[in-house]
Image (spheres, rainbow, N blue to C red):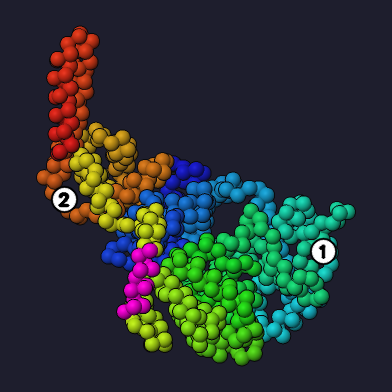
Amino acid sequence: MKMNGRIPEETVEDIRKATNIVDIVGEYVQLKKQGRNYFGLCPFHGENTPSFSVSSDKQIFHCFGCGKGGNVFTFLMEVEGYAFSQAVQQLAEAAGYSLPESATDKTPQQSSEAQSILEAHQWLEKLYHHLLRHSKEGKAGYQYLLERGFTEETIERFQLGYAPQSKDFVVKFLEKKGFHPQTMVKAGLLNVNDEGEYADRFRGRIIFPIHNHHGKTVAFGGRALYDHDPKYLNSPETELFHKGKLLYNFDLARAAIRRNQSAVLFEGYVDVISAYQAGVENGVGTLGTAISDVQAKLLHRYVEHVIICYDGDEAGLEATIKAARLLKRTGCQVKVARLPDGMDPDDYIQSYGAERFRQEVIEAHTPYMTFVMNYLKRDYNLQLEGDRIDYIEKVLQELADLDRGIEREHYLTEVANEFDMSLETLRQEVQELRRSKAPAKDNSRAVRHTNTKTAIHLQDKLLPAFQNAERKLIAHMLRDPHIADKVQDEIGGNFNIDQHQVIVTYLYAYYEEGNFSDTAQFVERLSDPDLKNLVVQLAMMPVLDEISDQEINDYIYTIQAEQSNKHDIQSLKAEQKKAEQQNEPIRAAEIAMEILQLKQQMKQS
């Protein structure tokens, strides 16, 4: 039996065939069907125009921008940094396959210390939750949550917990489980004083587990139940926990985000939980910091529409503006849910109830531009001519950044009517601003490699005829083993491009073993990532389903003609060298001219 690592190859294939790559990729990328394939924003490089394609028929993915491609295992390895066996394990669990103990990965990518920290967090989440629900000391925390309006279902869903006042209860618990105290200090679970005494970092607090996007607990947030300072305390950053990369509740909200085709962004975990209980299930939160570029791009991969619901005070408004501008730059359509001055989402829900929160805050959101225009007005006295002009200039700068022409026109009309100005003048001002910004935008697009189909077709046209012939021939060979048999009989592995030679050699062997056409299975034979990417790119090439024998023969002739010309050039170069050695400069020059003419003919063909 063949093995792939420690996992039998037959098992790997069963798991792959039981998995739909569209479902797996769809957990990371917002996909839209176009024709036979699905398209979305590439998770491996920044882009605003979808160039990432997933084929349900072939069970492969390919990015026309950055060139990455492969099957479902390759995707998980790329997006999560998994080893192959880890990717197989995750898909096996999802498909209901039970792998033998000998086949599980004992050497994961994470360090042994990170593994220890991860395991400690899982144990502590269970302990804190148990203490909240079933211990005498935890009753105070449980009662506090109930008085705050949290239901038992909510407490269970978010696995809320309680850390006891005792300094050494958690210390002893972790030691009994075999965790080294110093490692637990590094993990941010314990504190240590100058005398070397260890204590629970979160004692006397309500515990909010913080999960990574796979649902594993990697950190905690604690809210002081008694007179502790600070009121809120988060875990420090570790190898597993980076505040700027994770969004609170993303693992639980992902399905609702897809269902609603929008995400609601909050500033903290209490607001997220309160909103969930009020019926807003697509809410996520930042973790005590402003939203980062990584978090914004993560949201944009899943949804186009993001509603920001931050605190209604001055700091909340400032944070809203910054978050909105960042999300806009990533390509999101941004809306703002406004709260009364001085209130946060949890305050509002406590005061006015769930229904009013949904209807009068979330559903009554205002478009980004309307919010910005109202926000900017606060800094100007619009009764003064100078302030009016300054304000209008600021608004026009914001409007110049809007990509949709209809949106710009709507707000330009609004400004023209409000200030009794010429709409045409305002249009010209915005067009001038856009022209001044255009070079930077064009350059950034060039760097992002997001010109998809046009770029691919141009690339094919710019390649030599023989290389295009080899690419198209391999594309058909990947689809049909009978074509591969014909090519093998005619030219074998004698392709001109080295990578093509390697691919067809593997492909012949693959078909000779009795396998059917299956690109997702075939790429597992290739250990070189560049070769895998190339095979997937060729498999995704737009070629006709049917090809005549004449077309195949034409491709073969073009390939053989290139080889013949190269052979002729090599022979002429040998003759030229011999003429030079025999001191026949005229003969050497004549041969040089023959070589030049032959190269020109090859170039023209």
Q: What are the residue bounds of the magenta stretch?
A: 424-436
Is 211 placed above or below 586 here?
below
Q: Is residue 423 located in the magenta-colored stretch of the structure?
A: no
Image quadrant where one finds the N terminus: top left
Q: Is residue 432 located in the magenta-colored stretch of the structure?
A: yes
Residue 544, by quadrant, is: bottom left
Which mark, residue 169?
Answer: 1
**In-front residue for pair 526/469:** 469
Image quadrant where one finds the C terminus: top left
Q: Which residue is mark 2?
A: 547
At 14% across and 34% down in the image, what residue appears? 601
Residue furthest top in the image: 582
Q: Residues within 10 Å of mark 1 (few under 14, many from 20)?
A: some
**In-front residue for pair 500/123:** 500
At 77% across and 51% down in the image, what residue appears? 182
At 40% across and 71% down in the image, what residue appears? 400
Image coordinates for residue 575, horizontal then vertical, percent:
19, 16
Residue furthest left in the image: 550
Which mark, residue 510?
Answer: none
Image coordinates for residue 52, horizontal then vertical, percent:
37, 58
Magenta: main secondary structure equals helix
Relative horizontal placement of residue 311, taking residue 566 as reference (left or right): right
Where disc 2 sits, the SS reads: loop
The amino acid pointed to by label 1 is Phe
Q: Is residue 173 visible?
A: no
Residue at mark 2 to residue at mark 1: CA–CA distance: 73 Å
Relative horizontal placement of residue 316, taking residue 87 as reference (left or right): right
The amino acid pointed to by label 2 is Ile
**In-front residue for pair 375/546:** 375
Q: Residues within 10 Å of mark 2 (few under 14, many from 20)?
A: few
Q: Earlier in the sequence, mark 2 or mark 1?
A: 1
